[in-house]
Image: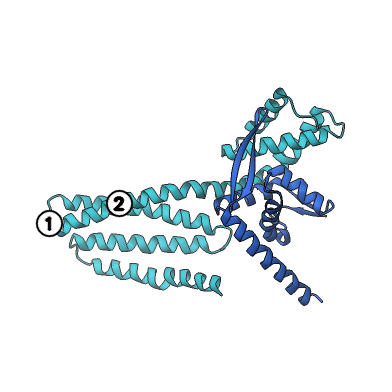
Amino acid sequence: MEKLSDLQIETIRSLVAKHSMHSQEMQQEIIDYMCCEVEELMSKHMSFEDAKNNTLQKVLLDGAVELEKNSIDILKRKGHQKKLIIASFVTIGFTSFSVILKLFHVPASNILILASALLLLFYLLPMVFKHQYLIEKYEHSKAKQKNIWGYIGVSIMIIGITCKLFHIPATNIVLVIGFVLLNIVYLPAIFHKKNMVRE
Amino acid sequence: MYICSMQSELIKGTLSVLILKLLKEHKKMYGYQITQMLKEQSNGELMVREGSLYPALFKLKDDELVETEEEMIGKRVRRYYRLTPKGEIETQRRITEIHSFISLLQTLFK
């Protein structure tokens, strides 16, 4: 089978580049796939131009949306996992350090506790639930709803615990709401799903 | 003819097993080769679209069942997929599972 020239490969590469694929890995795969398809058509006596247009229509115009939708989440999830591990170590380490200082009544530990709560609420928790959402996106239709309840429940708990540490009055009600959301809404949903998988 | 896109639920569940089986038989393969091999082995009945193939391959890689090896073909990169030791065990398990499922379906649809 006749191989494509460097110039012909470059033509296909620029066509793929125009469709701005999100990952380089996917872009390389599609270039090779299209080149193979063009070579196959050229071996059946089709001109390069016709083979290229035919493949372009089939792969990039008809199949691109499906390809992007199905592949990007997998690639995103992979990158997200590394970020999540780093974020967990940083946030949990910082929070533990702040709590120890608070227990020993070290001055300025209140500011660290507040910073830890903000880190947990706006950095780690959104990452955890986003990761969970990406994993369950195609497996569980109610995943999104369940994760939102989980995020709200844990957030209320963190706010409640922070307020409790600062001895703010009436924080017990916040903690109770957090407990209720976690124990009655979120946890049963997790255990129900795990049980279904086991069965 | 079955065109395998993500919409065809019947084939969706078995595509990864088909890929694993091919990789077991041929040691290493690239994307286009996999689609052509599936088409050839099914006598042209099964057309796997790239929109289904690459997500399945990425998922297998993500699960550490396959690993990749890059090769330059002229000015383009070709990525070969091969089974990892974990993938070889999993392939055997999934093939056995699919065989028993097929015989179950045959019993049910008699």
Disc 2 element:
helix
Q: Is residue B98 above or below residue B16?
A: below
Q: Nearer the viewer, residue A193 or A180?
A: A193
Across and down, in percent, residue A185 comes to 43, 70
Q: Quadrant of the C terminus of chain B?
A: bottom right
Across and down, in percent, residue B5 comes to 71, 52
Q: Is residue A26 above or below residue A52?
A: below
Q: Name the chain letter of the residue that bears numbered label 2.
A: A
Q: Name the chain letter of the residue that bears numbered label 1.
A: A
A77 relative to A49 in the view: left or right: left
Disc 1 element:
loop
- Choose top left, top right, bottom left or bottom right for residue A7: top right
User: In cyan, which chain?
Assistant: A
Which one is in front in this view, the residue at disc 2 or the one at disc 1? 1
Answer with mark 2 or mark 1, whichever residue precedes in sequence. Answer: 1
Residue drawn at (36%, 62%), measured in percent from left and top?
A154
Residue drawn at (72%, 42%), measured in percent from left and top?
B32
**On residue A120, which mark appears?**
none
**Label 2: how many Cα within 10 Å (few below 14, some 14–19, many 20+):** some
Mark 2 = which residue? Answer: A118
Q: Nearer the viewer, residue A151 or A131?
A: A131
B74 relative to A51 in the view: left or right: left
**On residue A105, which mark appears?**
1
Q: Amino acid at mark 2?
A: Leu
Q: Amino acid at mark 1?
A: His
**Label 1: how many Cα within 10 Å (few below 14, some 14–19, many 20+):** few
Q: Is residue A29 above or below residue A196?
A: above
Q: Nearer the viewer, residue A181 or B83?
A: B83
User: In blue, which chain?
Assistant: B
